[in-house]
Image: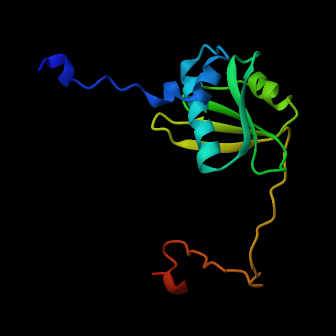
């Protein structure tokens, strides 16, 4: 037998062949790290979190891939901004995404593919009240006052 027939054909990276990755690549965004981050977020949203109607689009102002989708059927559309963790954002970039009119979620993608999601809002938002059976104990905790050195037991030596 010849040596050529014993060798297995080289394996291609499945990510590069995925239809969603190909669609993102066709958006012609120059930052390959952001394109890769967008694909990882797409996979998390569709396969793990089961978002509906997830699609990719290009932000011409920012030259980034954005994702849009719904948490569940009938829910409002949300925009997801996937970014590699090492990439910084300026206020103007955030403003471009917020001005789209949809709720925005920033997703930082670490080099080990860890994803961290953070909701972004236009302005300040008061936090939701805590949920759960909380009760006020109705008493304050008192702390002992420290006595200065040399006044041990209230007596001077």
Q: Residue at x 61, y 19 (%)?
A: 25
The image shows residue 92 at horizontal and vertical percentages of: 78, 22
In the picture provided, is 22 more to the left or to the right than 53? Answer: left
Q: Work out whether residue 93 or residue 124 is closer to the camera in this orientation and state it.
A: 93
Q: Quadrant of residue 138?
A: bottom right
Quadrant location, the N terminus: top left
Q: Work out whether residue 148 or residue 142 is closer to the camera in this orientation and state it.
A: 142
Is residue 38 in view from this perspective? yes
Quadrant location, the C terminus: bottom left
Rendered view: 8 above or below 151: above
Q: Work out whether residue 76 or residue 157 is closer to the camera in this orientation and state it.
A: 76
The image shows residue 131 at horizontal and vertical percentages of: 76, 70
Q: Quadrant of residue 40?
A: top right
In the picture provided, is 38 more to the left or to the right than 5? Answer: right
Q: Residue at x 64, y 43 (%)?
A: 46
- State how many labels appear: 0
Is residue 84 in view from this perspective? no
The image shows residue 31 at horizontal and vertical percentages of: 58, 17
Q: Work out whether residue 134 or residue 34 is closer to the camera in this orientation and state it.
A: 34
In the picture provided, is 148 more to the left or to the right than 106? Answer: left
Q: Which residue is drawn at 72% across and 33% down?
A: 55
Q: In which quarter of the image is residue 109?
A: top right
């Amino acid at each position: 037998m010849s040596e050529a027939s014993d060798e297995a054909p080289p394996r291609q990276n499945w990510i590069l062949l995925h239809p969603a990755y190909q669609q993102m690549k066709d958006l012609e965004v120059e930052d390959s790290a952001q394109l890769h981050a967008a694909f990882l977020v797409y996979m998390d949203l569709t396969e793990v979190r089961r978002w509906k109607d997830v699609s990719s689009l290009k932000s011409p102002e920012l030259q980034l891939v954005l994702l849009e989708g719904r948490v569940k059927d009938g829910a409002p559309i949300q925009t997801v901004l996937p970014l590699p963790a090492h990439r910084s954002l300026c206020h103007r970039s955030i403003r471009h995404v917020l001005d789209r009119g949809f709720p925005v979620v920033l997703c930082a993608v670490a080099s080990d593919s860890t994803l961290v999601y953070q909701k972004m809002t236009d302005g300040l938002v008061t936090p939701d009240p805590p949920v759960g059976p909380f009760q006020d104990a109705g008493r304050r905790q008192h702390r002992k006052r420290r006595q200065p050195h040399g006044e041990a037991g209230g007596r001077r030596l």
